[in-house]
Image (cartoon, coloured by chain):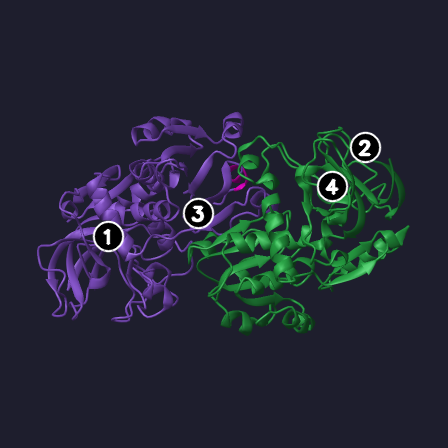
Chain colours: A purple, B green
Amino acid sequence: MKAKSYAVTSPDAPVDLYELERREPGKHDVEIRILYSGICHSDIHTARGDWGEIEYPCVPGHEIMGTVTRVGEGVTDFKPGDTVGVGVIVNSCQDCAACKSDYEQYCENGPTYTYSSKDPIDRTTTQGGYSDLIVTQEKFVVHVPESLDISKAAPLLCAGITMYSPLRHWNAGPGKKVGIIGLGGLGHMGVKYAKAMGAEVYVITSSPQKAEDAKKFGADGVIVSSDKDEMKRHSRFFDLLIDTIPVEHDLYPYLALLNLNSTIVLVGPINPMPGFHGGDLIDGRKAIAGSGIGSMKEVREMLEFSAEHQILPEVETVRMQDINEAWKKMQDGAMSHRFVIDVAASF
Amino acid sequence: MKAKSYAVTSPDAPVDLYELERREPGKHDVEIRILYSGICHSDIHTARGDWGEIEYPCVPGHEIMGTVTRVGEGVTDFKPGDTVGVGVIVNSCQDCAACKSDYEQYCENGPTYTYSSKDPIDRTTTQGGYSDLIVTQEKFVVHVPESLDISKAAPLLCAGITMYSPLRHWNAGPGKKVGIIGLGGLGHMGVKYAKAMGAEVYVITSSPQKAEDAKKFGADGVIVSSDKDEMKRHSRFFDLLIDTIPVEHDLYPYLALLNLNSTIVLVGPINPMPGFHGGDLIDGRKAIAGSGIGSMKEVREMLEFSAEHQILPEVETVRMQDINEAWKKMQDGAMSHRFVIDVAASF
């Protein structure tokens, strides 16, 4: 079927209207009318070729909320009318050790990303959520709890899960001091989740003007990273740091904030990170770890948790026609919220 | 009292005979006649100023085995005639969160190292084990189990504990695949401990000629790091890697060997390590951690474990007069064993 979409047709072309062909739903496919689609930093990086060459046109978007319109004959878990979401991945080999352990995002053969990946089902290049329609494999579709406002929930599927998964894995909770580095689309979700999990939460930011936002989202404190005294006062203070800074940066000032046996988790695939002194890890048995989105199991858990605690991102609704402007604002980096495209209002 | 020692008197001076003044044992001090003193890479780095300026003369040596000759009036745990050891640290503040949690090596106020540190007791610069006598605080002296051959055991106190501690902390044991990167003084101890703990152990080395040694020490396999096919075959193979490479090196090839949720532990304080790609940590939720020697509690546990499993380093005995030559051989890096100074035979 024809889908109305917005695509990028070359590394420096603007995002523009594009008519996309979607496949007929196969046996295990779900066809979804897209209602809302979040805008993620990854959309810009991928479409602009920052993370490697891609095939054009590229329809970005991997934070998708919509309504099921049709399902393949093998699909039992979804029916037309269901409110569902599609996140960052739409398939994986489902056969490797990672997939078999519910870690599809770490599939040994590489997961199929929602856009700019080779689709193992129809061998086309996957196309994402800047579109009014998507057809995709049931295993990677999730039900959205009724009490979640879907006009705001789309970013949970990337920004939300990217923060939820490491906070859970590294046991953010009562008695733990958690620092969220950076207060953008990811960071602000980190504050909300860590707080709801019961941790003592601090934002570490280079922007003093974000302090008020941080407190509003539930932070117990804000540390401005350029304030050396303040940073020093928090030496060995944190049990866990989640680092959302989207550009390369020196880890040393943050390693100094970690308590014994504690970890700083990078959630942005930055290439390259600068070097570091082995001694800064050795003194206190510290670790630099990475964490990538979350598994489908964790996505479902995160949506339930979000509904239970009414955790939603701060959202500014835009239309497809506003994407280029939104991308520009995101690249300027002054935001503590997320853009969501109201798809129905765009066409 | 006068102690016969070997010292370095400037960054490029040879190690040479030096008469050292040791303090009279204080209330909580133990006076030890040094019998054996291991030679560690740190001795060279510190004495040559690689890790920062130091005060000269410097008597290196932090792998000390000897016999108690006198004890202060407050000492109850040691008596003249006891066989004891002194390792890398000889004091710590004993008041900070780290010290109170049995992590003296990570003391927030900085532990007192066995040499080239400011001694909090007499305000002198500490002087190490290239000497026939040492006087030091009882809390940092350990009993040596009778069944351990003290002519070989000295390197357990640095090389041994540096490997034992991370292997224990990261749960090396049955069902775990452990890789030891580098087969020098540290690496060969890592192989022996990991094997005794029940893990499946592999050595990853740049020196194919070390394969035979690795097997002799108990390794189940050897991977030559320059063999790309072999490295690729072990992609995502390891549950734990301990990295003993003593010079800066790219971590990428080793990160690729780590399984999901697994860690590479650096035990050498290398400055700087080169940069890395955040994505290499994110893909598989991997971590780069550091580990420094071990706590006094762990040192005691390690000595018991070593005695029980009769784990001793491969040792070449030398005299004080041979130190300069030994240092040269160590810097050439072709060794899978450790030099130990026979102190009594030297004077």
Q: Locate the N terminus of chain B by quadrant.
A: top right
Numbered disc 4: what chain?
A: B
Q: Amino acid at mark 4?
A: Lys
Amino acid type of the residue tagged 2 in the rendering: Arg
| Comparing labels 3 and 4, the label whose residue is closer to the camera | 4
CA–CA distance in space, label 3 to label 2: 50 Å
Label 3 resides on the chain identified as: A
Seen in the image, is B289 located left or right of residue A149?
right
Res A266 label = 3
How many C-alpha atoms fall within 10 Å of the one at disc 4: few (<14), some, or many (≥20)?
Answer: some
Q: Nearest to the eye among marks 1 and 2: give it.
A: 2
Residue bearing the label numbered 4? B79
Chain containing mark 2: B
Give, as a single range, the part of the protein colored magenta: A250-255
Q: Nearer the viewer, mark 4 or mark 2?
A: 4
- Rendering coords of residue B99 (x, y %): 57, 36
Labels 3 and 4 in the same subunit: no
* Three-letter amino acid code at the position of disc 1: Arg
